[in-house]
Amino acid sequence: MTSIGTGYDLQNSVFSPDGRNFQVEYAVKAVENGGTCIGIRCKDGVVLATEKIITSKLLKPGANRRILSVDRNIGVVSAGLIPDGRHFVSRARDEAASWRSTYKAPIPTKALAGRLGSYVQAYTLYSSVRPFGVTAIIGGWDSEVEVGVDGMVGVGPSVGAGGKSEGAKKGGPSLYMIEPSGLYWGYYGAATGKGRQTAKAELEKLDLGSGGLTLEAGVKEAARIIYAAHEDSKDKEFELEISWVSSTSGPTKGRHERVPEELVAEAERLAKKAMEGDDEETVGVEGEKMEE
């Protein structure tokens, strides 16, 4: 069977004979043309980072943010078409506001990922719309502190349906990535965009599953990984943007915030130093081969 569209890519709601939705695949290609974005789940929070390509010298540094807050404890970064990413964030904020209005509490990161995954997937079903040209990474800290509900009377049942499980762990860091198809998974480390393969390889070296990486170390690793992923496009200037969210006892007090400028500057300095070290090692290896 043919591997190209040949008419099956004209409508979003039509499958090809070999079971492919070409419009979704084209949306993935749009994501691959975007700047690299990563998310790192640390033991005491989540770090989000993106490579913001500078397309004009007239752009104001620090403006046109790519990492945005959805609720006070959740942030989103997306790679792909920027207007699609902004609409995605707008929908995420509506979902967070709806949850807060109904349940009088911040929306859990997992619940937000589920709602947004369903929303994005709906855009793959109808011929009158096109898929989202973004892959979004959602990071948040779900409070481990039990918060009282506004207007609550009493404490509720201690056991049974709707009750509390003694010793159960609640809250903590969460990281999800939502693709143009609506598929979403929970991750320890996620990467998307042009440099995703390099970023993914670097994330796998960190052994994030062991839960030993601190939030500050995660910021420094995020900067290093973004710089490593940018090597393939090093002729283009870029701006590093990083945010984080910690526990209620951490530096952000459970809120999603931009990383302080002094820490970003330190992370960038270490990242550039690491890249210079890699270049020196590469030159040394090439020199030895020439001698042989």
Image: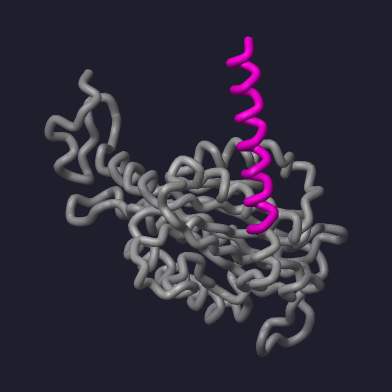
Residue at image x 24%, y 53%? 130
Tell me if residue 40 comes above or below residue 280 in the rendering. below
The answer to which of 194 and 23 lies nearer the viewer is: 194
The quarter in which the N terminus is drawn is: top left
Q: Is 255 left or right of 32, judged from the image as shown?
A: right
How far from the left and from the top, in percent, is residue 96? 51, 73
Main SS, magenta residues: helix
Residue farthest to the right? 167
The answer to which of 290 and 127 lies nearer the viewer is: 290
> Does 36 appear in magenta?
no
Q: Is residue 157 visible?
A: no
The answer to which of 71 and 116 lies nearer the viewer is: 71
Q: Quadrant of residue 292?
A: top right
Residue farthest to the front? 291
Q: Quadrant of residue 204?
A: top right
Residue farthest to the left? 7
Residue at image x 71%, y 73%? 254
How far from the left and from the top, in percent, is residue 283? 61, 30
How far from the left and from the top, in percent, is residue 89? 43, 68
Magenta stretch: give its range.
268-292
